[in-house]
Amino acid sequence: MPLFQLYFTPALLLLVLTCPQVSQSVPLMVKGTVTDSLVFSAQILLQSITGVLSKAEPFSGINCSQEMVKLNNETDTPSVCAPKGSKCSGINKTEFDQDLCLENIGKDLHHYFTFLAAQSDPGKFIDPTLSGLRELMQNFFPKHLPSDLVSEEDASDNSSSFDKKLNLCKVLKGFQLRSITINRVLSYMNSGEQTK
């Protein structure tokens, strides 16, 4: 019997780690709760975005660190996700709506996913960020993952290569800032502070 247990446990572990149906059967995000795996996935995404911005190749001819930031202004993530008791921007928040906050985060991720998926990336600099973003959305924000994407380049986009690189730089800087906000909010939710 001890010999059976000795070989059974590693075999079961190997099965769980290699079989996608078994390894993904554990829910990653229970409705209404933010798990450690969500927080970790968001941190990995932030590191990936920061890694792309630290490279010179995707922005040849542009000093990206000195460029302006282009934020997604279609969502209210910073204000909706402000912690309870926060007095940022002159607004005194007495309540924290976690569902509304997660909805806004999902919309932000959708916006940046759609933008990055439409970029031409011959050097494959954006691919790791796009893959990490896709995985994060599939596991935690599946309803915000676009099912129909426009091809690599919009046919009506006649801007120059320089303008495209400049826009990519600005949007990635905005995504980095929003990702920092998202990481802080998810850590806040994971800590349980919003329920106190």
Image: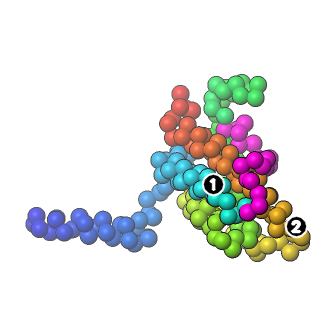
Q: Is residue 110 visible?
A: no
Left or right placement of residue 189 versus residue 19 in this view: right
Task: Tell me the number on the disc at residue 54.
Answer: 1
Position in image of residue 4 (x %, y %): 14, 69
Q: Residue at x 82, y 64 (%)?
A: 162
Q: Quadrant of residue 152?
A: bottom right
Closer to the camera in the image, 24 or 115: 115
Amino acid under disc 2:
Ser
Q: Residue at x 35, y 67 (%)?
A: 16
- Tell me if mark 1 has few (under 14), some (14-19) or many (20+) residues whose alpha carbon lies within 10 angstroms of its own: few
Left or right placement of residue 115 versus residue 33 in this view: right
Q: Residue at x 73, y 61 (%)?
A: 59
| Nearer the camera: disc 2 or disc 1 | 1
Q: Is residue 18 visible?
A: yes
Position in image of residue 47 (x %, y %): 56, 52
SS under mark 1: helix
Amino acid under disc 1:
Ser
Task: Tell me the number on the disc at residue 159.
Answer: 2
Measured in 3D between alpha carbons, the distance from the residue under mark 2 to the one under mark 1, in whole angstroms, is 24 Å
Position in image of residue 96 (x %, y %): 64, 33
Residue range of the region highlighted in magenta in the rendering: 60-81
- Tell me if mark 2 has few (under 14), some (14-19) or many (20+) residues whose alpha carbon lies within 10 angstroms of its own: few
